[in-house]
Image: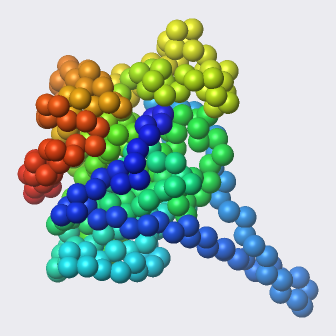
Amino acid sequence: MILPVRHRKTDLANADTVSCVLGLVRRIAVWGAVATVALAITLPAAPAQAITLDPSIPAAIAANYEGKDLRITRDLGSNSAYTRHAIAYSSNGLKITGVMNRPRGKGPFPVVVLAHGHIEPSAYVTGQGFRRYVALHVDYRNHAGSAKDPDSEESMRIGYAADVINAGLAVRGTSLGFIDNSRVALLGRSMGGGIAFQTLVIRPGVFDAAVTYASTSSNIVDNFKKWGSENTRTSRQILARYGSPEAKPEQWAQMSSRNYFSRITEPVLMIHGTADESCDISWARATKDALVKAGKEVRLIEYRGAGHYMYGPWNDSIRKVNAFLKKQLA
């Protein structure tokens, strides 16, 4: 899952390491030809429809994932470090868009797939990247030019995890010459950190390593109690469909990635501020303890006094991330 964390538009904003580009809503009409007698009539092809997803982890594990057809759809310009491309790929038949930052140089380069935090789709900013890696920033369904999924909220946004899994699979299967598809990592920020943990338990092995920044809780109940329990239409729909955490604890346990950490195969680096006002440090500590108990390779770096946006220790955290990626993607 994870439920809303109210972010500023510049979710990752260090000028030396991260570059941002406004995401344009890209609408591409696909046409198919239908022949009748001696007349060819061109009709619009029906777009792929999102199906209503079961948000439980066991159902997500049992599902099929078909991430493919990673393609550059438009050049967005370049600077001294990167060439930026608008991209798209297929996520179980849905068109998902994003921005790919390609480092200058010969390559091929390892890839970091970026799972962003909660940003209102109507005010979405896309295109965040790291130096020395191809950075693929995923526009989840309902964001930027990606396909629409009207049931995403009621499905607890489990479709976002499917889009990230399929981004990894699309990278693994790409023939783009500047990509080293044998070295692929995942980085999730805030809500994207929660999505990263879902991804790791649903499809182990798609990624070689994972980094989380200021992640939401791996226990979905924590997130719902903080952001989803207000008397809103979506909250009422969720409670009507799944029951409350108190009334249906088994249902909610099945929607929490923490209870499936035994499936994870990738090393994990977690970064969190002790004064995080959105995602409490206790969540990160509980997630780390659960990973250790499951026998997984994990390191939690705590920055004393740092808030959700890591303004003070940002540069130091990036150095630690780069060292981690260099080791794991060697």
Q: Name above or below for residue 99 compared with residue 151.
A: below
Q: In this view, does 312 lie to the left or right of 171?
A: left
Say how the picture is coloured: rainbow
Q: Is residue 297 left or right of residue 25?
A: left
Q: Name above or below for residue 15 compared with residue 202.
A: below
> Which quadrant of the structure image shows residue 67?
bottom left
The residue drawn where x is 64% and y is 41% is: 151
Image spot of residue 275 (x, y percent): 23, 29
Q: Name above or below for residue 260 compared with residue 20.
A: above
Count of number-bearing discs:
0
Q: In this view, does 15 lie to the left or right of 249?
A: left
Image spot of residue 318 (x, y percent): 15, 51
Image spot of residue 311 (x, y percent): 21, 46
Image spot of residue 184 (x, y percent): 25, 56
Judging depth in this view, the residue of 126 and 299 nearest the camera is 126
Q: Which residue lies furthest to the bottom in this view?
A: 38
| Quarter of the rendering occupied by the C terminus | bottom left
The residue drawn where x is 32% and y is 30% is: 277
Q: Residue furthest top?
A: 247
Does residue 46 show up?
yes
The residue drawn where x is 38% and y is 67% is: 21
The residue drawn where x is 32% and y is 45% is: 188
Judging depth in this view, the residue of 295 and 78 nearest the camera is 78
Does residue 172 show up?
no
Q: Which residue lies furthest to the right in this view?
A: 37
